[in-house]
Image (cartoon, rainbow, N blue to C red):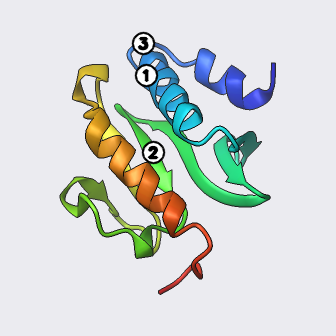
Amino acid sequence: MNPAENYILDKPEPYRSILLHLQSVIERILPEVELKFKYRIPFYYINGTPFCYLNQSKDYVDLGFWKAAHLTVHQEHMISEGRKVIKSLRYRSLEGIDDSILIDVINEAYVVRDARFYK
């Protein structure tokens, strides 16, 4: 098992369930993603380029998007909190995940994956 999977499985509930759900949705939508362990958190890469990451911090899980400056859908659900470029979807419970919003954001992030890091 790779360190990214260990990170997910070692988290207490409800964070483990949230992380596992996010992992399954990401990998189902984008089967070409590669899960790596970078910066001490699970990072998804596409063709060697960072795409998004999973991070459990405090009382939530962030699904952060690398090229968030180019994202336009569901901005009302995106958190930037002290970050200049990266935005994330933040979850505190498994029931709080709206799969339609999650899928929309993942799909748009995939479309803009080759854009420059900054707008």
Query: Could you give the CA–CA distance between mark 1 and mark 3, rounded to whole angstroms?
Result: 5 Å
Mark 2 or 3, nearer chain start: 3
Specify the amino acid type for callout 3.
Answer: Glu
Q: In what quadrant of the picture does the N terminus appear?
A: top right
Front-most of residues 8 and 99: 99
Q: Which residue is drawn at 70% across and 54% down?
A: 46
Q: Name the residue under label 1.
A: 15
Q: Is residue 78 left or right of residue 116?
A: left
Q: Give above or below for 79 relative to 37.
A: below
Mark 2 or 1, nearer chain start: 1
**Could you classify mark 2 by the number of other residues whose Cα lies within 10 Å: few (under 14), some (14-19), or many (20 or more)?**
many
Front-most of residues 57 and 113: 113
Q: Which residue is drawn at 23% across and 53% down?
A: 77
Q: Name the residue under label 3.
A: 13
Q: Do the residues labelled 2 and 1 touch (CB within 8 Å)?
A: no
Q: Do the residues labelled 1 and 3 touch (CB within 8 Å)?
A: yes
Circle 1 — which element? helix
